[in-house]
Each structure stands twice: as structure tokens, then as C-alpha cells.
Amino acid sequence: MKKNKIFTKFVTLSLIGMSILYASRFIEMKNTVSHLPYSKMETSLLQEEIERRSQNGNLPFEMGLELIKRWSGNKEI
């Protein structure tokens, strides 16, 4: 009887741990930008990525410049 309780707790904790690990990996993959150059990204994706990166404090100047080009319609900036 005691071994059954220990086994049940072990399985339960293992499932919880694996679920947390899977969820954290999924979030990590979702937050990773595809390796497309900024000029090839859709504007909506570029805007979302700029918002996320600016909140984290790691926004590259070129990425912001690309969005300004799209907003202004000026390709010579």
C-alpha cells in the first residue's frame, strides 16, 4: 500500500514537471523571432517584435529604422 502511494506521487510530480518544462519550451520557441531579415518580415510581426524587444531593452536600431521606413513609405531613410 505504501509503495503504491509513493509511486502515485512520483508519477504525478513527474507529469507536472514535464508539463512545466514543455510549456516553458513552447513559450521560449514562441518568443524566438524567425531568422528572416527585417525587410522580409510582415509589418504586423515586425511591430510585435519591436514592442517585445523594447520592453526587454534589447531593440536594435536597424529594426526600429525598418519600421519607420514602412510607416513613412520612404525607402531612402
Image (tube, rainbow, N blue to C red):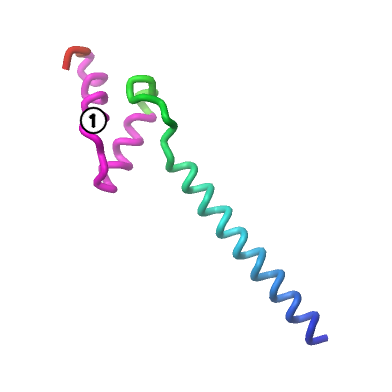
The C terminus lies in which quarter of the figure? top left
For label 1, the residue is 64
Q: Is residue 5 magenta?
A: no
Count how many numbered circles sit on residues in the image: 1
Residue at point 23% right, 28% down?
A: 62
Which residue occupies the extreme left position in the image?
77
Rendered position, 50 above or below 70: below
Nearest the camera: 61 or 5?
A: 61
Residue pushed farthest right?
1
> Closer to the camera, 7 or 73?
7
Q: Does residue 9 appear to the left or right of 51 in the view shown?
A: right
> Label 1: how many residues lie within 10 Å, few (<14), some (14-19) or many (20+)?
some
The percent coordinates of residue 44 (x first, y second) are 37, 28
The answer to whether residue 49 is above or below residue 39 is: below
Describe the element under mark 1 as helix, strand or loop: helix
Stretch in magenta:
45-73
Q: Which residue is farthest bottom?
A: 2
Q: Is residue 35 left or right of residue 38?
A: right
53 part of magenta stretch: yes
Quarter of the image holding residue 36?
Answer: top left
From the image, give the main secondary structure of the stretch colored magenta: helix
Front in this rendered view, residue 48 or 41: 41
Q: Residue placed at 30% from the left, 42% from the top?
A: 53
Considering the image in quadrants, where does the N terminus appear? bottom right
Q: Position of residue 49 (x, y in %)?
A: 34, 36
Q: Where does the image place residue 3, in percent across and percent down from the top left?
A: 79, 83
Q: Please, what is the three-letter code of the amino acid marked with disc 1?
A: Gly
Which residue: 43% across, 40% down?
32
Q: Position of residue 72 (x, y in %)?
A: 20, 18
Residue displayed at 30% across by 39% down: 51
